[in-house]
Amino acid sequence: MFISKRHLIKIFFVLMLAIVIGISMSACSSSFSESKLKELYANPEEFKGKTIKELTIQIVAVDKVHGEIHLQGYENFAKQEHPTVVVVSDNDVKYEDGEYIKVKGKVLGKTNVVDEESTEMTAVKLKAKKIEKIKSTDAIPAEETLDVGYTVKIKGIAATVQKVDLTSDETRVYIKVKNGTKKNIELYPEQSIVSQDDNDYEADLDNYLYDDIQVAKHIKSGGSISGVIVFKRIDSNLPFTFTLEGADNEGNELELPFSFEMK
């Protein structure tokens, strides 16, 4: 069968375009699955040149290397596993230890890092294309959310539980407190209690994963604060109570109780 030279050129162009598109697609990945993430951190060199569209890490160190900003952190920040180094080209944005970032970046391969105990580890190295700072409550997604909007008012103090999040391990109580008195007040989040089924759960203020959303303790007259108090995971199907304590600057104690009847 006779095929014209022009038709051959067209076929060749289409084939080349298909190859180029195929190469581009193979070098690009959406958010990696859990199994792909394990492969990435086990063999970073095999993913060299690929793009991760969304990777969340907690920063543990910020270094300057040959004029570049290197953000060292963990993808699995709860267990401090999957060490990662993100190379940042934008030096105008400041980053700090403990912050959470969502990264889109190109895999450069592997690099060696040293943790706080001087243990050398192999880390995945990325060249950042886009970085977004996020809060811990976004980095650690909730499995269930109870939208509450429940307000208790006592002696000019108005406290509102805005919502309650349940993760796999924790209960997060989002609270806002407004001081409508003429006195300064102090909150005691460390004395907060969640009670359920005859069990009392104290606030976990030592949980380093949530340092960015801690509730401030001091509220001036007319002022307000908001934050999150973290407890052990409770059962979302059972009633529970939450109690916030504090005192004014004259030593008068405050107790703000909330009772939740689940449907």
Image (spheres, rainbow, N blue to C red):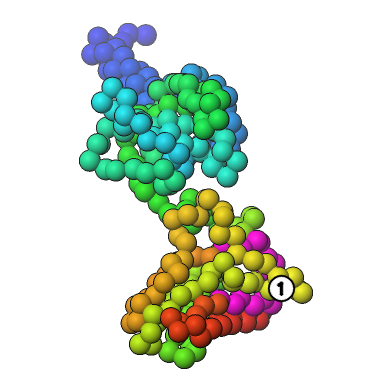
Residue appearing at x 37%, y 19% in the figure: 19
Toward the viewer: 155 or 228? 155
Q: Secondary structure at mark 1?
A: strand
| Vertical arrangement, residue 168 with respect to residue 196, above or below | above
For the record, the magenta segment spans 230-244
Which residue is the site of mark 1?
Answer: 196
For the N terminus, the quadrant is top left
- Tell me what residue is drawn at x 59 percent, y 70 percent: 191
Is 52 situated left or right of 196 in this image?
left
Left or right of residue 62: residue 204: right
Three-letter code, disc 1? Gln
- Residue at image location 33% in from the left, 17% down from the top: 16
Which quarter of the picture shows residue 53?
A: top left
Q: Is residue 11 visible?
A: no
Please tell me whether residue 234 belongs to the stretch shown in magenta: yes
Up the image or down, 81 lies above or below 47; here it is below
The residue at the far bottom in this view is 155
Circle 1 packing at 10 Å, graded few (<14), some (14-19), many (20+), is: some
